[in-house]
Image: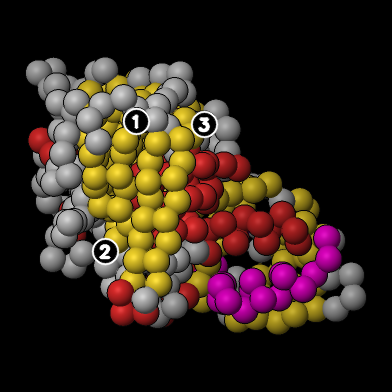
Amino acid sequence: MKFIVSSTDLLSHLLAISRVINSKNSLPILDNFLFQLEGNTLTMTASDIETTLITSMEVETVEGSGKVAVASRLLLDTLREFPAQPLSFNINDTNLALVITSANGSYNFIGQNGDEYPRMPQLQEDARMLTLPVSTLSSGISRTLFCTADDELRPVMNGVFFDISDQGLTLVATDAHKLVRYKTVHTSATLQEGEETVNFILPKKPATMLKNILPKESGDVEIRFDKKNAHFKLGNYTMICRQVEGRFPNYNAVIPTSNPYKIIIDRVTLLNAMKRVSVFANQASNLVKLAFSINEIHISAQDIDFSISAEETIACQFDEEPIKIGFKSSFLIEILGNINSTDIIMEMSDASRAGLILPFENEEGEEILMLLMPMLLND
């Protein structure tokens, strides 16, 4: 089979799916891209068995059809060095010898039999479907992904929880120290009769793939899922992945509902102050103390081992009794960096219970809540 393709177009498609490929694979065939040519459409697949990413593009001057597996690293390293130009691919169907011809030379590969590449998992007939705008899914995953855990003992925490009802979609991620809940009404879901909610856990790796791909896409994304696999269909990409098995924690139970202390703060001012003061925090605990009094916050940190300390006072809107609370500074900085709102609201009840951080204004049709567990204060 033969075809001609733009070097830069091919490289951009292959780079997007190449992140799926592991550095060490249990099956040697997974070190390859699978190329399938049908008519003028070239479909490229990359997989690590758990997650599969598929993309397709139009090619020119086509002869024949078929499929072949091509060494991913060798092909990517070759394509990176080409300026934008048409490349001619010629694949011998008998011995799978592959020749790429450019304006100035030719490059010889040996392909592998495409039939050896693992088959894609098929969804069961009772698979549910969910449709939502690409921009909404992109926003939801980018807001929640940073909160996922790396916990071998509790694998259900190592992903983003999709909680689907007829009211909309809720994405949740937690590592037991911090939690993010992202709600959106911009969805349409097909639930079976009598079902109020359905859910699944998207593992961290495919969620990261989606985070990278979604900003380049537009329109709607169609999500189909059964009890084992999830299938994401975009304009230029299709991703199939195995879900995390197990029951996600009851996230609503850990979100405190009665919080008498409410503080409005400029997000960037607090973020920058936290970054400066946290440099002086104890490296083991990363503890930063926040003392709230009338219309101001006193932020302080110290490391007794090195005899260093820092403190800073910033303005806020607060008119309750003074309250002190301690947070792990890296977690709070991470949370503040993942909110877009100019101002934020901090809600608390006391120094031993979780604090809530909310945007002062949510985007239309969205609702974001972030929770952070406090650290024990000695004073």
- Of tags 1 and 2, which is closer to the observer? 1
Q: Is the C-beta separation of discs 1 and 2 under 8 Å?
A: no
Which amino acid does the dot numbered 2 rest on? Asp
In three-dimensional space, the C-alpha distance between marks 3 and 1, rounded to whole angstroms, equals: 21 Å
Which amino acid does the dot numbered 3 rest on? Thr
Q: Quadrant of the N terminus?
A: bottom right
Q: Is the C-beta separation of discs 3 and 1 under 8 Å?
A: no
**N-terminal of the two: label 2 or label 3?**
2
In three-dimensional space, the C-alpha distance between marks 2 and 3, rounded to whole angstroms, equals: 31 Å
- Where residue 72 sits: x, y (%)? 56, 73
Left-right relation of 32 to 120: right
Which color scheme did the rendering employ for the protein?
secondary structure
- Where residue 338 sits: x, y (%)? 44, 44
Helix, strand, or loop for circle 2?
A: loop
Residue furthest to the right in view is: 104
In three-dimensional space, the C-alpha distance between marks 1 and 2, rounded to whole angstroms, equals: 40 Å
Helix, strand, or loop for circle 3?
A: loop
Left-right relation of 309 to 371: right
Residue 317 visible somewhere in the drawing: yes
Tell me which residue sits at (38%, 41%) in the image.
Answer: 297
- Where residue 369 sits: x, y (%)? 31, 33
Residue picked out by circle 1: 294
In the image shown, does 263 or 117 lie closer to the viewer? 263
Give above or below for 92 relative to 62: below
**N-terminal of the two: label 3 or label 1?**
1
Q: Which residues are magenta?
A: 65-84
Circle 2 Cα neighbour tier, 10 Å, few/some/many (<14 / 14–19 / ≥20): some
**N-terminal of the two: label 1 or label 2?**
2
Tell me which residue sits at (71%, 54%) in the image.
Answer: 9
- Of tags 2 and 3, which is closer to the observer? 3
Give above or below for 123 relative to 45: above
Residue picked out by circle 3: 342
